[in-house]
Image: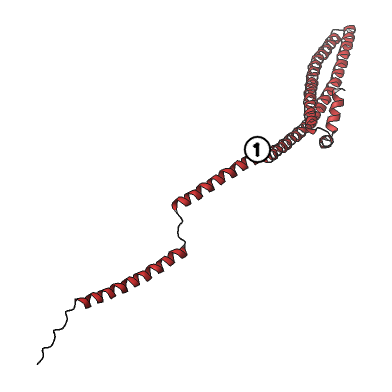
């Protein structure tokens, strides 16, 4: 397939449609990018060649213009000297130079047209290349995101996770057992109700103790009091 046939296919292609219908869009995108970059180099080379041809035609036109002017001067000189034969020969040479100029001008117009056509092709091809690269980057990002989701889900449902959770449960059970054992060593702390009941019992005991002290004190005082003396008979 020639360069210009490939170029036309690329420029007229619908990249999104091509990638959507491909079995491996990312691979197709890479191939398209490579094809476009290769074609871009060829088009740039063709544009540079067209510019070089145009400059060469300009130099040749200048060269034959000098020749034409020189023969025109010589024809005038020959007429002044009465040499019509030389003047006729000079005019023939001048005519040939003018014909060469005309051919170069036509070739230069074609080279200029080819150059501008290649420039237009470069612009459109570069736009297509940028589109393909953007599509390729988007496909890569989507693939990487999908692979990341697969890795995360695979790791989430991996049996190693279940094993780790089971080991964690065993550790948690051992901690519960240690805490229970610590409770047995420390003794059972009284509840709030038990503490209030103890306070009430303490108050009752204190009241009973106070009453007992008073009773004992009265008994002791009574025992210590001396007996009254007996009355004498008359």
In this image, 8 relative to 204: left or right?
right
Number of numbered discs on residues: 1
In this image, 165 relative to 192: left or right?
right
Position of 185 relative to 234 (above/below): above
The extreme front residue here reads: 233
Q: Position of residue 104 (x, y in %)?
A: 84, 18
Q: Position of residue 100 (x, y in %)?
A: 86, 15
The extreme left residue here reads: 234
Residue shown at the point (32%, 70%) measured from the top left = 209
Q: Which residue is mark 1?
A: 160
Residue closer to the observer: 20 or 6: 20
User: In which quarter of the view is residue 211 placed?
Assistant: bottom left
Quadrant for the C terminus, please: bottom left
Residue shown at the point (81%, 15%) measured from the top left = 60
Neighbour tally class for label 1: few under 14, some 14-19, many 20 plus, Cα within 10 Å: few
In this image, 180 relative to 218: left or right?
right
Q: Secondary structure at mark 1?
A: helix
Quadrant for the N terminus, please: top right
In this image, 172 relative to 61: left or right?
left
Q: Position of residue 24 (x, y in %)?
A: 81, 32
Q: Position of residue 117 (x, y in %)?
A: 82, 28
Query: Which colour style is shown?
Result: secondary structure
Position of 147 relative to 49 (above/below): below
């Amino acid at each position: 397939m020639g360069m210009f046939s490939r170029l036309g296919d690329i420029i007229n292609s619908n990249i999104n449609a091509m990638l959507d219908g491909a079995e491996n869009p990312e691979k197709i995108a890479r191939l398209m990018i490579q094809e476009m970059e290769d074609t871009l180099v060829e088009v740039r080379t063709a544009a540079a060649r067209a510019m070089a041809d145009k400059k060469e035609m300009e130099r040749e036109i200048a060269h034959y213009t000098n020749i034409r002017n020189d023969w025109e001067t010589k024809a005038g000189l020959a007429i002044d000297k009465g040499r019509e034969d030389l003047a006729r020969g000079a005019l023939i040479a001048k005519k040939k130079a003018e014909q060469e100029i005309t051919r170069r001008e036509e070739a230069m117009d074609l080279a200029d047209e080819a150059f501008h056509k290649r420039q237009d092709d470069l612009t459109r091809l570069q736009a297509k290349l940028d589109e393909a690269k953007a599509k390729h980057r988007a496909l890569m990002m989507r693939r990487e995101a999908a692979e990341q989701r697969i890795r995360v889900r695979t790791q989430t449902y991996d049996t190693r996770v279940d094993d780790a959770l089971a080991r964690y449960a065993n550790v948690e059970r051992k901690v519960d057992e240690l805490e229970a054992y610590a409770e047995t060593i420390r003794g059972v702390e009284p509840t709030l109700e038990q503490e209030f009941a103890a306070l009430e019992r303490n108050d009752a005991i204190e009241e009973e103790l106070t009453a007992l002290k008073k009773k004992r004190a009265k008994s002791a005082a009574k025992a210590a009091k001396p007996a009254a003396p007996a009355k004498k008979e008359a």
